[in-house]
């Protein structure tokens, strides 16, 4: 016996709303009608739009002017970690205690100055530390190269 999907026991049901005998879709369609008050999240607030940023949020005009705190070299963007790490590498790997030690001393002074809020002193000490470490590494490389060449010349 074949059962007609549109009828069951004399009741009409729509396909997709359960087996025959359960009736049609609920009244109002689907999960019911829209919620009271129109539903959704509503429109924009009165006055059209959501307003501007709170007072004191960003510079006037909405962008940072040239030379402002986001420019490299301006503000508190002093890197004291790199001179410190390079000084340690100079001491340990290159065995260059003189240049590495002096560079480490200036790197520590730069870190201390940055912690105290003296950005210009921190910047100058970090720069001096980097120069000393780089000069030490270059002199170390030249010394190693001359030592290798002298060893090759003797043999």
Image: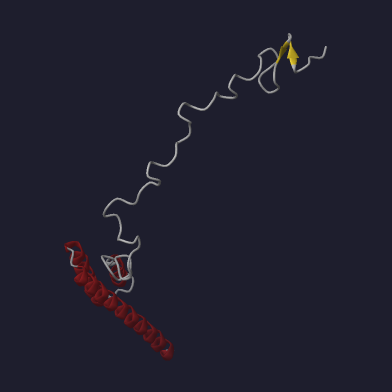
**Extreme residue toward the right, this view:** 1
Q: Is residue 126 above or below residue 16?
A: below
Closest to the observer: 101 or 120? Answer: 120
- Residue furthest to the front in view is 47
* View extreme (left): residue: 116
Viewer-proximal residue among 66 and 144: 66
Give the residue drawn at x 63%, y 20%.
25
Please provide percent x and percent y for residue 89. 32, 69
Residue 64 x %, y %: 33, 64
Left or right of residue 55, residue 2 in this image:
right
Q: Is residue 97 visible?
A: no
The N terminus lies in quadrant: top right
Picture coordinates of residue 145, whole percent (x, y): 39, 84
- Note whether residue 143 is visible: yes
Q: Is residue 24 left or right of residue 114?
A: right
Residue 17 located left or right of residue 34: right
Q: Nearer the viewer, residue 25 or 42?
A: 42
Residue most toward the bottom?
153
User: Would you say 42 lies left or right of 2 here?
Assistant: left
């Amino acid at each position: 016996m074949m059962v007609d999907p549109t009828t069951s026991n004399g009741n009409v049901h729509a396909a997709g709303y359960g087996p025959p005998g359960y009736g049609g879709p609920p009244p109002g369609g689907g999960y019911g009608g829209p919620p009271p008050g129109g539903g959704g999240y509503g429109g924009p607030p009165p006055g059209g739009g959501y307003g501007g940023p709170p007072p004191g949020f960003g510079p006037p005009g909405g962008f940072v002017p040239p030379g402002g705190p986001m420019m490299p070299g301006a503000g508190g963007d002093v890197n004291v970690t790199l001179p410190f790490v390079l000084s340690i590498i100079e001491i340990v790997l290159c065995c260059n205690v003189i240049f590495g030690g002096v560079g480490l001393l200036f790197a520590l002074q730069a870190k201390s100055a940055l912690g105290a809020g003296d950005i210009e002193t921190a910047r100058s000490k970090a720069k001096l530390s980097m120069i000393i470490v780089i000069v030490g590494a270059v002199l170390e490389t030249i010394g190693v190269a001359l030592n290798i060449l002298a060893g090759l010349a003797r043999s």
